[in-house]
Image (cartoon, rainbow, N blue to C red):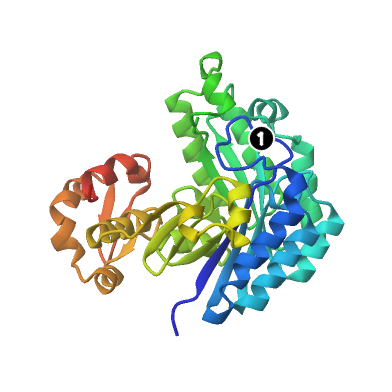
Amino acid sequence: MNKPLGVYIHIPFCVKRCAYCDFYSGADISLSAEYKNALIKHIRSYKDLHLTVDTVYFGGGTPTYFGADGLCDVLKCIFDTFCVLPNAEISAECNPNTASGDAFKKMRACGFNRLSIGIQSFSDKELSLLGRAHSASDGINTVRSAKKAGFDNISCDLMFGIPSQSVHSFSQSLDRLLSLDITHASSYILKLEEHTKMYADRSSYTFPSEDDICDMIQMCRERMEHYGMHRYEISNYAKSGYESRHNLKYWSRDEYLAFGPSASGFYNGVRYTFTHDINKYISFANGKISLDEALCEKETPSRNDAVSEYLMLSLRLVRGVDKSEFKKRTGKDLDCEYGDKIAPYVKGGFMENGTHLRFTDKGFDVSNTILSDILDFDG
């Protein structure tokens, strides 16, 4: 049997666009019923392939703004179309104030077993700067409500590098997050993307210094570990057994199907991304335009790029690259291919090279620079 696939569903609806967000969102919510039907038609087109699935992830946008009924209808279609394994991880992203206890109960009953809640900060001042549509207390109440509804696998996002953020305010947010006894956390630096409000206003902000950012990273790592949340990926922490199985597919270069505008997939060796246009996607699902017309990207990575991709993605993980698995997948010996480039970083304490090649904590802080030196992608 082939390795089980992941399924990614993009929900492009939001209460409001955050000031830093460049994801495809903000689609007209009046299209939600039409969009749900389009998703269902597209998903059903895979039925005759008899594919096995072990992770499902609803991202956005804000999936819970789409509504529990809509999410459950789409999930039911996934169960009807694919062989979804009994222990499958089924996740939905959620922003505070977009779902009530009743909605969480309905989602839990229909098969969702994991929530990823966009907290970002427990400082109301910082949330306002980010353009979030919730307060710190809303974030706390959402986590508690989800737990009460039966969710025992909850992830929360926490951001550092926010304008006017201090090491002290980040410390307070971190402690408040950990006091909620969640099972998974993603902590990442704010990145200003072009075509966002924060990027346009960037000259008016005062950002934390590089030293403060380094202190926040170290504090996060140490405090997470103290609370039993081990770092397993450059920006992700989890209690044992609660690592994001869906995201591990991305970092392990495993295959996953994509549904929805702007959704990206990797299937049969092909990477593809759907158009960032809900109306065009709906037209595709209804058979009015071709698949190629509905895609904005489609490529089959070359053999060399596939090897580089696998190494780059695997090195995001704390466990790094298993050399025997690398040879099994690529037919290449990692040390023969990259040994000369790796050696200086091992000597400098940035990498460890045994049965696995992996970054040290020191190496993770400059991993992008090291990877750009080691890897060679085809032009």
Quarter the N terminus occupies: bottom left
Q: Amino acid at mark 1?
A: Arg
**Direction from residue 250 to residue 261 in the image, left or right:** right
Q: Toward the viewer: 352 or 243?
A: 243
Label tally: 1
Residue behind mark 1? 17
What percent of the width, then of the height, locates residue 227? 60, 52
Q: Toward the viewer: 275 or 194?
A: 275
Residue furthest to the top: 204
Residue 331 occupies which quadrant of the picture?
bottom left
Secondary structure at badge 1 equals loop
Residue 163 occupies which quadrant of the picture?
top right
Residue furthest to the bottom: 1
What percent of the width, then of the height, locates residue 15? 74, 39
Asked if residue 7 is positioned above or below residue 237 in the image, the reply reads below
What percent of the width, then of the height, locates residue 67? 78, 54
Any part of residue 94 in sight: yes
Any part of residue 260 in sight: no
